[in-house]
Amino acid sequence: MNLKQYFISMLIGAVLCWTAWVLVLVNIDPFQDNGVGLSFFYGSLFLAFLGTISLSSFLIHYYFSKLDLPLFRFVQKSFREALFISAILIVLLFLQGKNYLQWWNLAVGLIAVLLFITFRFVNKRSAETII
């Protein structure tokens, strides 16, 4: 699969996931749901976040990186970051929906995101010194 095919398939997948999320949002009443609707809600939102963040992260890495890496490295990096950030967002949204989200939960989530970003920059700098 070349980059154009990957980009088009991820774009179509993200648009379909956003469409599925909107359909779930419009058609399912959360107060009369037995849990299946909420799982569709969180699942489609997670996949929509994953596709959107992955594509935007790839574009940012590709156009603003000073490293001369193969394209699949940019795809790997962006997908890994999107997976982590999407999971954190969905967990925080789930906690908010259950009224469990407090200031300390939010602080732990933000610290996890900041640590992830910090480790990515440390890895990037160590990769630059090796190359």
Image (cartoon, rainbow, N blue to C red):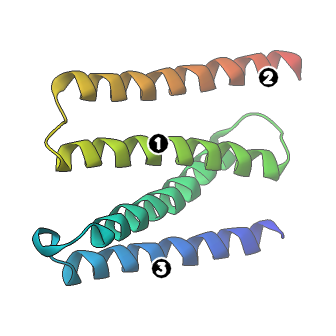
Contact (Cβ within 8 Å) of mark 1 with mark 3: no
Of callouts 1 and 3, the N-terminal one: 3
Q: Residue at x 13, y 42 (%)?
A: 99
Q: Regarding mark 2 in the picture, which secondary structure is present there?
A: helix
**Front position in the image: 91 or 77:** 91
Residue type pointed to by label 3 = Leu
- Say left or right for 54 vs 93: right
Q: Residue at x 53, y 62 (%)?
A: 51
When the figure is inspected, residue 99 is found, relative to residue 15, above or below; the finding is: above
Marks 1 and 3, how far apart at CA = 20 Å
Q: Residue at x 38, y 21 (%)?
A: 111
Q: Residue at x 50, y 70 (%)?
A: 14
Residue 121: which quarter of the image?
top right
Tell me the residue that label 2 is attached to. 127
Tell me the residue that label 3 is attached to. 16
Of callouts 2 and 1, the N-terminal one: 1
**Front position in the image: 57 or 42:** 42
Q: Regarding mark 1 in the picture, which secondary structure is present there?
A: helix
The mark lying in front, picked from 2 and 3, is 3
Residue 85 percent location from the top left of the image: 47, 42
Residue 113 percent location from the top left of the image: 44, 29
Of callouts 2 and 3, the N-terminal one: 3
Label 1: how many residues lie within 10 Å, few (<14), some (14-19) or many (20+)?
many
Tell me the residue that label 1 is attached to. 85
Q: Regarding mark 3 in the picture, which secondary structure is present there?
A: helix
- Say left or right for 83 vs 122: left
Q: Residue furthest right?
A: 131
Label 3: how many residues lie within 10 Å, few (<14), some (14-19) or many (20+)?
some
Image quadrant holding the C terminus, namely: top right
Q: Residue furthest front?
A: 34
Marks 2 and 3, how far apart at CA = 36 Å
Residue 124 percent location from the top left of the image: 70, 25
